[in-house]
């Protein structure tokens, strides 16, 4: 048995599980990377560790300093977790429509949450973070939307894990994009190991990757209204635009059929992965990323009937 020295050592090393309940063509495997099993409950714990350790190592942050970040929630939870025991203050700027559970978890981990108006989108949260940083001495804004450490965190950890989990037998990688860091960093690593690996990106309706106009959607954590400069669009071998209805239907099916309690961005990725599977040749291994769990969205009634959930207010 391994004795872990702190919560920081629990980040990463998540399991890959073969899905059983969904009909697949003969010889095709659908393998879910369970990022919701990270200690802070999402894929973004990897980014939090990277941002905090890099900032302390480079001197951008010193003890007593303050890390400030615009976030929809999971990056905040990841950063707050990474800051535990490091003697730094943590402030997040969060558009006010994002999940209350995530805001509660950020506060539970010692962070201060500053809400910004949701109609200003993530850009409003970014502007607020910059404004606070100008006022608070010793502060640092990593800004996940403009920081190359974002894809680097996944290039260094998630990509190698997926490759090693399957001894290199990866054929397709499917993941959603919010900042695009997870997708870009992981795709970058996998393509470097084998350029024939197909990397497929997932967005909700109301995101711009397939040429659509920005619009509200309920699927939380993915969707872009601008493309950060570190995103390598050449890795978009296919872009799936998934409706909220399909994303939420799949998360309910994953709970009942697989016992996996996944959030809506995972549901969207699952829907895209199932479409990929339809045209896959026998022997194809499709890896789908499940970034977080349903438990941080229960207040939104995500396991209620479709009619009930669809009545809920829209978030970006
Ligand atoms: N799913 C969820 C639930 C998320 O919170 C995020 C991060 N916003 C993503 C997917 C997408 O991750 P990335 O920002 O790396 O594209």
Image: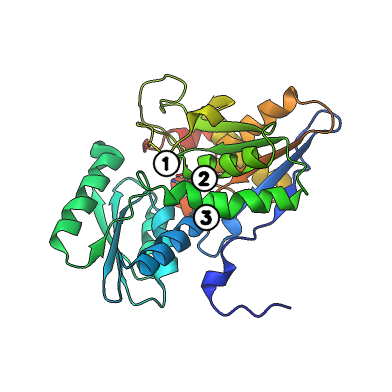
Dot placed on the residue nearer the N-terminal end, 3 or 2: 3
Distance of label 1 from label 3 (alpha carbons): 15 Å
Left-right relation of 101 to 113? right
Left-right relation of 132 to 44? left
Question: Which residue does the numbered mark 3 point to in the structure image?
Answer: 42
Give the quarter of the image for residue 26. Answer: top right
Q: Does ligand 1 reach within 8 Å of label 1's beta carbon?
A: yes
Question: Which residue does the numbered mark 1 point to in the structure image?
Answer: 179
Q: Are marks 3 and 2 in contact (CB under 8 Å)?
A: no
Element assignment for label 3: loop
Q: Residue farthest to the top?
A: 211
Distance of label 3 from label 2 (alpha carbons): 12 Å
Q: Give above or below for 22 relative to 298.
A: above
Element assignment for label 1: loop
Element assignment for label 2: helix
Q: Does ligand 1 reach within 8 Å of label 2's beta carbon?
A: yes
Q: Position of residue 229 (x, y in %)?
A: 38, 36
């Amino acid at each position: 048995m391994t004795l872990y020295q702190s919560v920081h050592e629990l980040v990463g090393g998540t399991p890959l599980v073969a899905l059983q309940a969904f009909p697949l063509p003969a010889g095709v495997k659908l393998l879910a990377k369970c990022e919701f099993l990270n200690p802070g409950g999402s894929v973004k714990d990897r980014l939090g560790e990277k941002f905090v350790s890099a900032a302390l190592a480079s001197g951008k942050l010193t003890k007593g300093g303050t890390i400030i970040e615009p976030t929809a929630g999971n990056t905040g939870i990841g950063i707050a977790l990474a800051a535990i025991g490091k003697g730094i203050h943590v402030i997040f700027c969060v558009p006010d429509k994002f999940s209350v559970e995530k805001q509660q978890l950020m506060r539970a981990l010692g962070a201060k949450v500053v809400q910004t108006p949701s109609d200003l989108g993530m850009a409003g949260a970014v502007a607020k973070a910059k404004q606070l940083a100008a006022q608070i001495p010793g502060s640092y804004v990593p800004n996940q939307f403009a920081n190359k450490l974002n894809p680097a965190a996944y290039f260094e950890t998630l990509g190698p894990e997926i490759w090693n989990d399957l001894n290199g037998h990866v054929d397709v990688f499917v993941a959603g994009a919010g900042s695009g860091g997870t997708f870009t960093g992981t795709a970058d690593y996998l393509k470097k190991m084998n350029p024939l690996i197909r990397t497929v990106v997932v967005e909700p309706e109301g995101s711009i990757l397939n040429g659509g106009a920005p619009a509200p959607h309920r699927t939380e954590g993915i969707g872009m209204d601008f493309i950060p400069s570190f995103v390598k669009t050449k890795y978009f071998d296919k872009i799936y635009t998934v409706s909220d209805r399909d994303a939420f239907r799949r998360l309910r099916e994953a709970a009942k059929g697989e016992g996996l309690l996944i959030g809506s961005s995972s549901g969207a990725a699952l829907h895209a992965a199932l479409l990929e599977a339809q045209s896959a040749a026998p022997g194809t291994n499709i890896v789908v990323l499940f970034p977080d769990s349903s438990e941080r969205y229960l207040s939104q009634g995500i396991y209620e009937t479709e009619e009930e959930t669809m009545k809920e207010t829209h978030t970006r």
